[in-house]
Amino acid sequence: MQKRQEDLNKAIGLLKLLSHPVRLSILCNLVHNGEMSVGEIVEAEGGAAGRSQISQFLAKMRAEGLVKTRKEAQSVYYTIKSPHARKVVQSLYDIYCS
């Protein structure tokens, strides 16, 4: 029973992170495009949020284990880390964004 509650709490945490439109859009872009730099993500969001807000969202998602980073020179690249998040976002993308 405790394992089930832990799993439910993880699912609730993921759904809370996905409940913000810009965070969901960022993850949809990462599912669709694969690895992206912060600049590419900002451009893909098309003004829905500024660079600093997007950086804050990415930091939060990284802290929660949804995304991971790779640094190359001055650029930071993001990809989806969590296989569970990838499956959920891929399903949402297939239903609503493709």
Image: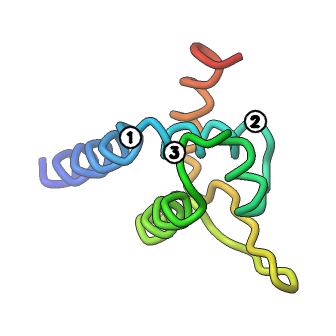
Q: Earlier in the sequence, mark 1 or mark 3?
A: 1
* Mark 3 burial class by Cα count in 10 Å: few <14, some 14-19, many 20+: many
Image quadrant in which the C terminus is located: top right
Relative image position of residue 39 (x, y in whole percent): 75, 60
Q: Please tell me whether mark 1 or mark 3 is closer to you in this view.
A: 1
Q: Please tell me whether mark 2 or mark 1 is closer to you in this view.
A: 1
Looking at the image, the residue that sits furthest to the right is 73
Q: How many numbered marks appear? A: 3
Relative to 48, does residue 61 appear above or below in the rendering?
Answer: below
Q: Earlier in the sequence, mark 2 or mark 3?
A: 2
Relative image position of residue 21 (x, y in whole percent): 44, 35
The residue where tag 1 is placed is: 20
Relative image position of residue 82 (x, y in whole percent): 55, 55
The residue where tag 3 is placed is: 85
How far is mark 1 from mark 3, CA to CA?
14 Å
* Secondary structure of the residue carrying numbered label 1: loop
Quarter where residue 73 is shown? bottom right
* Secondary structure of the residue carrying numbered label 2: helix
The dot on residue 32 is 2
Q: Earlier in the sequence, mark 2 or mark 1?
A: 1
Judge from the rendering whether residue 92 lies leftward or rightward of residue 71; answer left or right.
left
Nearer-the-camera pick, 53 or 33:
53
* Mark 1 burial class by Cα count in 10 Å: few <14, some 14-19, many 20+: few
Tag 2: amino acid: His
Tag 3: amino acid: Ala
Relative to 44, does residue 39 appear above or below in the rendering?
Answer: below
| Residue at figure coordinates x 47%, y 59% from the top left | 57
| Residue at figure coordinates x 74%, y 74% from the top left | 76
How far is mark 2 from mark 1, CA to CA?
18 Å
Relative to 7, does residue 31 appear above or below in the rendering?
Answer: above
